[in-house]
Image (tube, grey):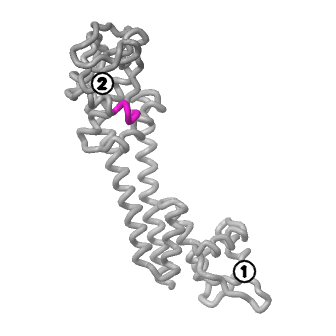
Amino acid sequence: MGRNLQSGARLRPVDLARGHGLSTQAVRNYEAAGILPAADRTPHGYRTYTPLHAGALRAFLALVPGHGHQTATSIMRAVHRGAVDEAFRLIDESHAQLLDDRRTLQAVERALRDLEPTTAPETGTETETGTETETGTGAEPGAGSGPAAVSAPGGTFIGPLAARLGIRPATLRTWERAGLVRPRRDPRTGYRVYDESDVRDARLTHQLRRGGYLLEHIAPVIAQVRSAGGLEPLEATLRDWRDRLSARGRAMLGGAAELAAYLGER
């Protein structure tokens, strides 16, 4: 539906719907949700819309790709109840979220660049320290207790890995509780054994923590690495992530233009 309608033109629900590729039921639903202003009624009770309604619909449909359906709905509702500042606040929050997502992406890209090639996994004696005092049947010993243990080929224990990263073993245990690393347990000794993928996840977590990111913000990144099957396949995911952020930014510009036009019409 173009902008060349006369201000006094009257539109049937089907006119408004067809002009935007919607069903008449969708138009009625949008009106009921407050996305559109209330329609006028004919003496026989039929809805009639105006170019103002068409502007509201254009604004909403333009806002959805950048802000999402729920936020776009809240923005239009705020406008129609006269709370324009609230609508602007919602828009600001979306832009802030987009900026935060961009910064997260940049942090992940920096972390991946900073990761050195993983060296051969280490084996040796478990050297965990902390408050855990568990038996040797599936549990780990406290500091300085228990026999020496040799991990399965391709694995490393918590002590050597913590030393490699320059952190305390307790930090690795915290990351494990947050789901960021998932070491297996040696069936004979119960010691934690970190394989190559665990070392990768620990190194990436370490880089992001150094960048100031919270564990709950790191967890989705680690999940993406795992689902991608490693760091190299993740590069394609990061490109897609970057493209989607750019698309959201462009969509927000388009939504802002349509909303500004609608506010001008009002």
> Circle 1 sits on which residue?
12
Q: CA distance from mark 1 to mark 2?
A: 72 Å
Q: Is residue 5 above or below residue 115?
A: below
Label 2 neighbourhood size at 10 Å, few (<14), some (14-19), many (20+)?
few
Q: Is residue 2 left or right of residue 104?
A: right
Q: Which mark is residue 181?
A: none
Residue 60 occupies which quadrant of the picture?
bottom right
> Circle 2 sits on which residue?
132
Q: Say which residue appears at 30% left-offset and 17% top-offset.
A: 141
Label 1 neighbourhood size at 10 Å, few (<14), some (14-19), many (20+)?
some
Q: Give the SS element for disc 1.
A: loop
Residue 29 occupies which quadrant of the picture?
bottom right
On the image, the x and y values in percent for residue 16 come to: 67, 75
| Tag 2: amino acid | Glu
Q: Please report the bounds of the magenta region as a residue range.
A: 175-179
Q: Say which residue appears at 49% left-offset and 64% top-offset.
A: 71
Q: Main secondary structure of the magenta part?
A: helix
Q: Say which residue appears at 36% left-offset and 12% top-offset.
A: 136
**Foreground: disc 1 or disc 2:** 2
Earlier in the chain: of badge 1 and badge 2, it is 1
Q: Say which residue appears at 63% left-offset and 90% top-offset.
A: 8
Q: Is residue 239 left or right of residue 162?
A: right
